[in-house]
Image (spheres, coloured by chain):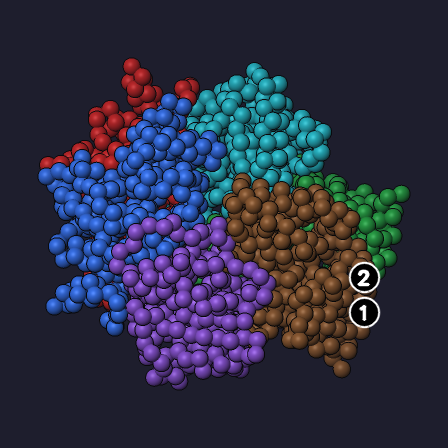
Chain colours: A green, B brown, C purple, D blue, E red, F cyan
Amino acid sequence: MHIHLITPIITKGLRTLDDVSQLMSDELSITQSLIETGPASIECEFDEAMSVPGIVVEAIKAERAGCDAIIIDCMGDPGMKVAREMVSTPVLGPAETSMHVAAMLGHRFSVVTVLDAVVPMLENLATVYGVGGKLASVRSIGIPVLEIEAAPERVSDELIKASLEAVEQDGAHAIVLGCTGFLGCADAISAALNAKGYDLPVIDPIPATVCMAAGIVRAGLTHSKRTYAPPRSKELAGYPAITEELQGDRT
Amino acid sequence: MHIHLITPIITKGLRTLDDVSQLMSDELSITQSLIETGPASIECEFDEAMSVPGIVVEAIKAERAGCDAIIIDCMGDPGMKVAREMVSTPVLGPAETSMHVAAMLGHRFSVVTVLDAVVPMLENLATVYGVGGKLASVRSIGIPVLEIEAAPERVSDELIKASLEAVEQDGAHAIVLGCTGFLGCADAISAALNAKGYDLPVIDPIPATVCMAAGIVRAGLTHSKRTYAPPRSKELAGYPAITEELQGDRT
Amino acid sequence: MHIHLITPIITKGLRTLDDVSQLMSDELSITQSLIETGPASIECEFDEAMSVPGIVVEAIKAERAGCDAIIIDCMGDPGMKVAREMVSTPVLGPAETSMHVAAMLGHRFSVVTVLDAVVPMLENLATVYGVGGKLASVRSIGIPVLEIEAAPERVSDELIKASLEAVEQDGAHAIVLGCTGFLGCADAISAALNAKGYDLPVIDPIPATVCMAAGIVRAGLTHSKRTYAPPRSKELAGYPAITEELQGDRT
Amino acid sequence: MHIHLITPIITKGLRTLDDVSQLMSDELSITQSLIETGPASIECEFDEAMSVPGIVVEAIKAERAGCDAIIIDCMGDPGMKVAREMVSTPVLGPAETSMHVAAMLGHRFSVVTVLDAVVPMLENLATVYGVGGKLASVRSIGIPVLEIEAAPERVSDELIKASLEAVEQDGAHAIVLGCTGFLGCADAISAALNAKGYDLPVIDPIPATVCMAAGIVRAGLTHSKRTYAPPRSKELAGYPAITEELQGDRT
Amino acid sequence: MHIHLITPIITKGLRTLDDVSQLMSDELSITQSLIETGPASIECEFDEAMSVPGIVVEAIKAERAGCDAIIIDCMGDPGMKVAREMVSTPVLGPAETSMHVAAMLGHRFSVVTVLDAVVPMLENLATVYGVGGKLASVRSIGIPVLEIEAAPERVSDELIKASLEAVEQDGAHAIVLGCTGFLGCADAISAALNAKGYDLPVIDPIPATVCMAAGIVRAGLTHSKRTYAPPRSKELAGYPAITEELQGDRT
Amino acid sequence: MHIHLITPIITKGLRTLDDVSQLMSDELSITQSLIETGPASIECEFDEAMSVPGIVVEAIKAERAGCDAIIIDCMGDPGMKVAREMVSTPVLGPAETSMHVAAMLGHRFSVVTVLDAVVPMLENLATVYGVGGKLASVRSIGIPVLEIEAAPERVSDELIKASLEAVEQDGAHAIVLGCTGFLGCADAISAALNAKGYDLPVIDPIPATVCMAAGIVRAGLTHSKRTYAPPRSKELAGYPAITEELQGDRT
């Protein structure tokens, strides 16, 4: 099986295949691409919107290359619905996937994320995904995406603090990491929560979404084309890369 | 007062200032612009996403030109949240505005729109806008946006039929036209409903939104910058028109 | 345009046209009346109920006098639904209007009001108006309506304190003043919130409702007569002023 | 135990103690009064509002006369919240009580009522009472209150028809009669539903509310004075009967 | 009238008829039985599930003995839905009954219970019973069921503390005792709340449910057989006591 | 990886490993067991409750045998919460899993199941699992579980009919088979829906749950022990097989 990860930013080096190498096996290969047009990181509605055209290009390319599932590597799930219209290959977003997994595993879940600015976005996603009633809270640690890499200890400490508050004050029974840039932080949070007597799942969105995507593929499922019908053909100005892919698609 | 209407498509001639001339007065001037990059019409998530970068450009330009409010001329409210991050001038979407006005005026409302493909989008908007409990139904007439102009009678007949079904089968107490391309159709629907004994508001989104935007401006209000904080400054690739506007913005 | 404000209490001098003079213009005249039967102030379900018959009289009179919209000057929206049954002229309540405006402008809103006793009423209104999911909290300052005028500084201080708590503890992204007697307090609250770095709308219900009512009128809309059908004619004992107005209405 | 029934209309003879005689016993006496000011019947928000001042008078009188519980004999529960502020004796409304009993006994319930005009009112009551999620539908039979007595067979036939539709089309698992004027109709509906193979509760609101009120009294409970605090003392104009009762109350 | 109480545990002496003797009268006899198979106390999903087969046996026996209503003496309402399928006699659960009564009497209610482990169960019950929107909070005192009897003062102190926090921090307008083992504790809590100025109902589930069950019986009502249809006859292995009762039932 | 399937009935031969053989591989072995005490099939609350003690025994055995995940082979998810308390190995229910997968893949989903009797159970499950807002409808085909095997064509025809109605009348964008006995029917339904122009997922719960369980295991996740804490040790009467397993567990 082949899963393609679209990291919807233009900043090189933040995400590498090393991050997910432990998930690869004889049965599962993973590839990854950045986008060519878009923002350096995603922390607001504007950043998200700027990432979508680039995601469309990568999604069409990935499907044409024969991948079995596509994952958008950002907890805002930018372009997920759009990409589902453009391809038949399953497209998964880590926010949608992690929230549903968290809802399955515990009574209520909290999301711990980067900045206050994305709290309304994550709450709205939970609502639209139909699991708003399972969301205990969204907490943020006040560290921008591009500063995560340089301050791993502070990030870890703040995530532990926010997770503990989510458990003790908000009634969280599961934690979802609210930025895919937190990849690898789950174990430290679990350990810290366990040390306080709290035994609950801490969901690292990208590994979890890769595993669930593999499940969706093995089950022979994909998104509903009644919800995500292919766009009607029409004129489009200003997106040469997309136009080129769409023409490729039709020939 | 000066209100600017961004029609988020590239098709010329569909929307002209003639459509809203009856709203203009000594006190209210209205201007309008198309977008330079984007789709010919908006009927799905892809079309919406493609319209957003162009909307950002027009919104920044409109604010710099000193307008008092900006309205996005599409019932998907594409780019509304993004534009609110980019400018301080009030930005209104006709879906959000019409749904809240309908919720104020009647017990429940239905939306009658163009195609099945946009039904989930409109239902999701109602949910995120917080008025999902007031939505009786979304019905569609099966006519694409670009065919509305050529078939005014069929459009009117189908809208009347869908509105009657919304009233009689879904319990609608108010009707919201679900495409800004239906501008001018409300009177015929009202007359047809009245002839059947149903006296209820039929909301034409663009006129209604222009009037409510004027109200927001007179009340000295704008969107919350706690919800729509200005994006953090960062690198952006592939959007020269936006980059140029943002630089203009900072100089 | 002519908007009539019904102040649904019998206490003279609390509300004068001076309070709304800044909203008047060549295009907008505002008149105001008290009710002749009812309570000195409105702070509970009993007070509200006692105000309704007097509101009915004033609403019928205002419509007959040719006004374009009627506003009920109390955040309990007493008699709003009743008045909508009695007249075709748009009738707006400041609670309904402000809550919908707040829901449009920000992610969640809080109401800051006079007394604990009205908290359930305001929460129930948000629920019935369909925006309960957007309500972050209702907070009260413990000052009765008739003491507001005498203690403007204490009122302002307490409103600032409650608004800050709503923002910092309850997640409010917009504030609605929860008593029309707070008219004029919004600026001080905005300034205090801004000083703490919170840039969000503070909605003063009467100015906001006057402006939105003007918008409703200009859009040619009124409340749904399917929701608010005229009452069937029947015997009524004990309300001579209403009976007289209704007879006038039918002759 | 002594339960007092306030029939909140001025029409004599519609409700007599004969209607509830089968509920009386050595242990339970029932008294009843009409109101002196108010409408001939209750079928809209206006009628309801007009009944409330009269209900207040009767409620205070009933409490002073030493009754153990007060029931408001109308499915709009007019004045229930107001009366709860005025007295400490339990005040029950048949809508609130029947809806909660129906929610306890079956998966979902429908209400069958008199006129379309009261459908929004009943839906709003279910929402405010917190059982909106258990409400399958509200259906109406198009017969005004004052015509019920003269057309018992037509009423029964229409109620049976509406109840069957509620069961077969709306998924009702229990039926609530939506007008206290339907007292005595439950058996015929039950029989008709049973003949079709549907074995489910048909709740006649007044008998059910009398029995549940007796239960509340025996359990030593009454409404929360935190929700229904006594009104603050203040001037009141135009309600001599209430003023007199309140003075009596304080002396 | 004869009400039978099934105490769904095997521990003798915890519940005796003395506990409910004040409710008995010439008109109301109460009997009680333990179950023969099941747990010593109920504090989790496993305990609940283990109690259900024993409850089925007791419910069938109680119906055959001619009782008028059956109450399951545990705030998890174990086996309530199952028993309703097996018998036509009304079966009431104290959680369902108390929560609906609390919802009727106040704006919002909190439950104060034994252990954190049952909080999700009680929240889920409120949701399924349709009153989740009226639930302010569930708080626990950290004392297991079998330790209640030995530490009455600590239990009372902790219940008072939790109730006060529910009122002051969670906005409770009514309190429901969240374990039937707390029988008799309501008065002390009421007194303590009153001493702090909070006048609100404290619902002791078993007395309240006995009184409401009597009301249901007098109203001639029982649970919906559309919701709780009798099980289809089929083979059952491993439950000799149930099989015996079912055979008795059919002969 | 080793997944164990607990088929919670006593009827032999209905479910065999042949049914899931296409899911087995070098990487995934599947075992299966029936329960020793319980019902012949599961079609109501009573049947479910009777299956739980047997499920507990099989779950403990399966965990001790070293399996990686446990699946309960019934769309009522009987004993899922109980088993999660007893073991640390992930326990998945096909209803919970399928409903969350359906919610991820389409706008709304419908469940098509065996009998009317299980409709409330499935609706309640959707509510408790937090996806009630994504449930379009539950439809039943009126065929008992034990008759499925003998009438495959009728079952298939009825499932197609119910699925079409769900799509056309209820707005389903995905279909979930509502009985694990329907295993293998998804393809025929998909084909029939496709022939009508509806391209949407039809989820066969057991294959889907096996695949998602494998994903949960690979992601290193299991259910929250904060939600599903191990039961406190206490006396238990009448369940020798469970007692034996628990003793084994502790030695």
Could you tell me which residue is drawn at 36 percent across and 31 percent down? D154
Where's the C terminus of chain D, which quadrant?
Answer: bottom left
Could you tell me which residue is drawn at 52 percent across and 81 percent down? C22
Judge if badges 1 and 2 mark residues of a common chain: yes
Residue A245 locus on image (x, y percent): 85, 50
Could you tell me which residue is drawn at 30 percent across and 68 percent down? C38
| SS at badge 2 | loop
Q: Which residue is mark 2?
A: B37
Circle nearer the N terminus (1, 2): 2
Instruction: Give the quadrant of residue A28.
Output: top right
Residue type at mark 2: give it. Thr
Q: Disc 2: which chain? A: B
User: Is F227 situated above or below B63?
Assistant: above
Instruction: Give the quadrant of residue F244.
Output: top left
Q: Which residue is mark 1?
A: B241
| SS at badge 1 | helix
Quick one: B74 or C141, which is closer to the camera?
B74
Residue B221 is labelled as none
User: Is B183 situated above or below C54?
Assistant: above
- C-alpha distance separating marks 1 and 2: 10 Å
Q: Disc 1: which chain? A: B
Q: Residues within 10 Å of mark 1 (few under 14, many from 20)?
A: some
Confirm whether residue D93 shows in the render: no
Specify whether F161 is left or right of C18. Answer: right
Residue D221 locus on image (x, y percent): 22, 52
Specify whether B119 is left or right of D174. Answer: right
Residue D140 locus on image (x, y percent): 41, 40
